[in-house]
Amino acid sequence: MADKSGLKKKNPDKLKNFITKWGTLCTVLIVFVIFTFANWSKETNSSIFLTSNNMITILRSISITAIIAIGLTFSLAVNGMDLSIGANANLADFVVMTMFVWYNMSIGTSIILTLIIGLAAAVINCILIVKLKIPDMVAALSVMFMFQGVAMTYSNGGAITQRMTRPNGEVATGLVPEAFRALGKEPWLIIIMLLVVAFAHFFLKYTKHGRFMYAVGGNPEAARLSGIPVNKYRILAYFLSSAFAALGGIFIAARVGTAQVNAGAAYLMPSVAAAYIGFSVAGAGKANAIGTLVGAALIGMLENGLIMMSVPYYAMDIVKGGVLAIALALTYSNSKKY
């Protein structure tokens, strides 16, 4: 009798552990299969979802989200929350475009200056969070509003385009280089996204600095007592977060060829969702680069498949929010303690 009761208790635990560890990947597979058959064409007797062109479209659509979400992954690794990533990407989008259109600068100079300006968000975040001890989310939220205002003021509340009339009345003579525009197209955008994910994965998993970040995020007091400079790694996390957010903004400019109002802000929630979905991939239970990529892919597939099924755009957020809730439930279902 004891053996039978033990088996009964063990089997539900095995199922629960399997769902927690592999539930998100199973969700990705299920979504993939559903959209494959839901978008089946009788004329060609094949799925219009499962074509090489559509797969490339999905990869291209998730690339910028994944890059920005990787930045958020670093801040989540130290148990932070950088909500300023969307506004930072938006400002970077405006800055790099004005470098070309207003000031006729080279590609290298424009990108470097934009990244430096983007790191200003990290400096402000670190002062508020590390020095002034303001809670991460509140501090990042204030920086988000600050950077949104800076971007709007810098652009005089309008878009940045070629041949535009500048705020001083002059016509902008600069052009966006074709080599820069190529960075926003496949294969380069996809390749760069994969390189960013590979760097973040290697850094967080295989370097002592990544392990120290996880230690800080898990228990900062224990990390401090073991000799890890907690503030140093929190600062590093926010600098990496800002750098990748700014990089994402640069690729928004490369992809669109203009800087539109709040273009970067639109990537905030998809990036947050991708990073949090990543928590549940393979039962990681913590921020990780591969999980973030899987999360971005899931969101990209959802958007692509729902568009093919002619689902209204305003209903997509309901689906994405539901998937995020499921992913979080899978992540924390086994962590509940009594």
Image (cartoon, helix red, strand yellow):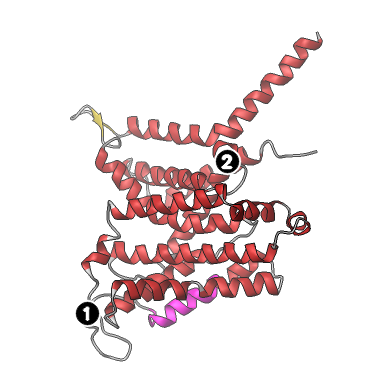
Residue 261 shows in this picture: no
Percent x, y for residue 192?
Answer: 36, 55
- Image check: 95 left or right of 174? right
x 62%, y 71%: residue: 126
* Residue type at the position of mark 1: Arg
Residue 254 picture location, percent across and down: 30, 64
Tell me: 4 left or right of 38: right
* In this view, the mark in front (1 or 2): 2
> Magenta span covers which residues?
144-157
Quadrant location of the N terminus?
top right
Is residue 153 magenta-colored?
yes
Local SS, label 2? helix
Given the image, on which type of amino acid does mark 2 rest? Ser
Q: Residue, x 67% and y 54% (percent of image)?
A: 217
Residue marked by disc 2: 280
Residue at mark 1 to residue at mark 2: CA–CA distance: 47 Å
Q: Is 239 placed above or below 199 here?
A: below
Image marks 1 and 2: residues in contact by CB distance under 8 Å: no
Q: Is residue 329 above or below residue 314?
A: above
Q: Main secondary structure of the magenta part?
A: helix
Q: Nearer the viewer, residue 91 or 231?
A: 231
Label at residue 163: 1
The residue nearer to you, when weighing 334 against 43, is: 334
Quadrant (top left, top right, bottom left, bottom right) of the C terminus: top right
Total numbered badges shown on the rendered structure:
2
Residue at the limit of the structure toward the top, as seen here: 1
Give the secondary structure at mark 1: loop
Residue depicted at x 39% and y 79%: 157
